[in-house]
Image: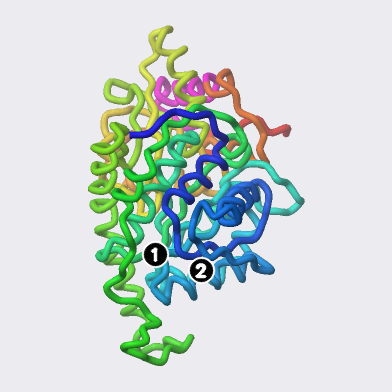
Amino acid sequence: MGNRIALTGNEAVALAMKQIAPDVVAAYPITPQTEIVQIFSQFVADGDVDTEFVTVESEHSAMSAAVGASAAGARSMTATSSNGLELMFEIVNIASSLRLPIVMPIVNRTISGPINIHCDHSDVMAIRDSGWILLFGENAQNAYDNLLMANRIAEHQDVMLPVAVNLDGFIISHAVENIDIVANEDVRDFVGDYYPEKYLLDEEHPLTMGPVDLQDFLFEHKRQQIETLKIVPQIVQEISDEFAELTGRQYEFFEKYKLDDAEIAIVAIGSTAGTTKAAIDNLRERGLKVGLLSIRLYRPFPADAIVKALSHVKAIGVMDRSESYSNTGGPLFSDIRAAMYDAGETAKIINIIYGLGGRDITVKDLENVIGRVKEVQDSNQIAEKVIYYGVRE
C-alpha cells in the first residue's frame, strides 16, 4: 500500500506530482508555493520522473504553456499562489473554456496590496466563477489525496475541465505532518495513463482555431460548460469512492464533524476546520450541541447536499477567510445563504470574516465565535449579520 512519512504540505504535493508523473509541468516561483515546483524540478533533474519541465518568465506564461501542452494531448500541471494566480487570470479562463484538464495546486495567500505573503483565500475566490473545479482540504494529507484524485476528475471524458487543489499557505504548505503515502505502483494504477479521445492539436485531424467566439456560438459553448459542471459532483464522488477502496480514506463533498445531532453549525474551508474541531470538542464537554461542516468541493457548489446536511440546525456561522467587497458578506456565506434560502430553510445564518492576511485564529477564538452563533440561536435574532472577528476597530 505505502508508508507513513513526515512531510510538509508542499513536499506532499510535490511527491504526489512525482507519483502522477505528468507529461509537462510549466512553473514560475511565488511564495509560499515555490517549494512545490522547486522540489519537483529536482525530481526531474535527478531523473526520478520523465516530465518536460518548462521554466517560464511569468505565471501568465506558465498557464499559457500548460494550455498549449494540454491542447496537444499532454497531461499538464502547474502551481501558483496569490498575485501569481491573478497574473494567470486571462489564461485560467481560457483553460476552462477550451475544456483542458489541467491540474494546479494553489497555495492560498493574500492578494496584494499591500504586500502580504500569508494565508487567506482571496486568491482562489477571485477565480471561483472561472469554470474551474475547486477542491479544498484541512491538512497536508488532504492536499496529497486531493491531488492524486484531481487528474482522474479533470481527465474524465464526461468532464474535461481543469481542477485546482487548494492548501492554506504556510499553515499547511510549510507545516510538517505525518502523511500516509500511497505506493508508486498503486498511484500509477489509480491515476492511469492519459490518452485523450480528442484533443485540440491533432496532426491526423488538423483544424484552425482562433481566439474569437462571437454572438453565433459563445453562449452555447458556455452552456456546455454549465451542463458539464452539473454532473461533476457525481463523478467526484465516484472517484473518491474508488480512492477509499485503495486507501481506506473516504472523501465526500464535505466532512461532517459531530454535526448529526447538532443544534448549531460552523461552516468552514481549509485548515481552520481542524481548529474548529478542537473548539467543538471543548464545547461538547460543556453540553453545547455544535458541529462542523468542512467544505471540500467548493466549485461546482454541491448545494443540495449541503442543505440536507444543515437542514436540522437552528443557527449557522459561516467562516470566510476572504471578503467579497459586496457589503453583504464573504463568498462562502453568500453561497450557503442562497442555498438555504432556496430550500426554504429557516436557520439563522451569520458570517464571520476572519484571518485576513494570515492573522491567526485559535481554539479559544473559535469557542468565542461559536458563542456568537449560540446567541443567535437563543435570541432567534441576528443583531450583526457580518462579524469581522479579531480585527482592531
Relative to the observer, which residue lies in front, 173 or 323?
Answer: 173
Magenta stretch, main secondary structure, is helix
> Disc 1 on helix, strand or loop?
loop
Percent across and percent down for residue 83 are 66, 58
Tell me the kind of residue under disc 2: Ala
The image quarter in which residue 99 lies = bottom left
Asked if residue 144 is positioned above or below residue 220 in the image, the reply reads above
* Mark-to-mark CA distance, 1 and 2: 10 Å
Task: Assess whether residue 372 is covered by the magenta stretch.
Answer: yes
Q: In the rendering, at what x and y percent does residue 204 appear? A: 32, 88
Residue 310 in sight here: no
| Residue 190 or residue 110, whichever sits in front | 190
Residue closer to the observer: 313 or 274: 274
| Image-based side of 185 in relation to 283, left or right | left
Three-letter amino acid code at the position of disc 1: Pro
Residue lying at the far front of the rendered structure: 47
Label 2, secondary structure: give it: helix
Q: Give how far across and how far down residue 20 sits, in percent.
A: 42, 52
Highlighted magenta segment, given as a residue range: 367-383
Q: Which residue is mark 2?
A: 66
> How packed is label 2: few (under 14 Cα within 10 Å), some, or many (20 or more)?
many
Residue sitting at x 54%, y 55%: 47
Identity of the residue drawn at 37% across and 56% down: 151
Query: Residue 210 at what x, y percent from top left?
Result: 46, 89
* Residue with the mark numbered 1: 101
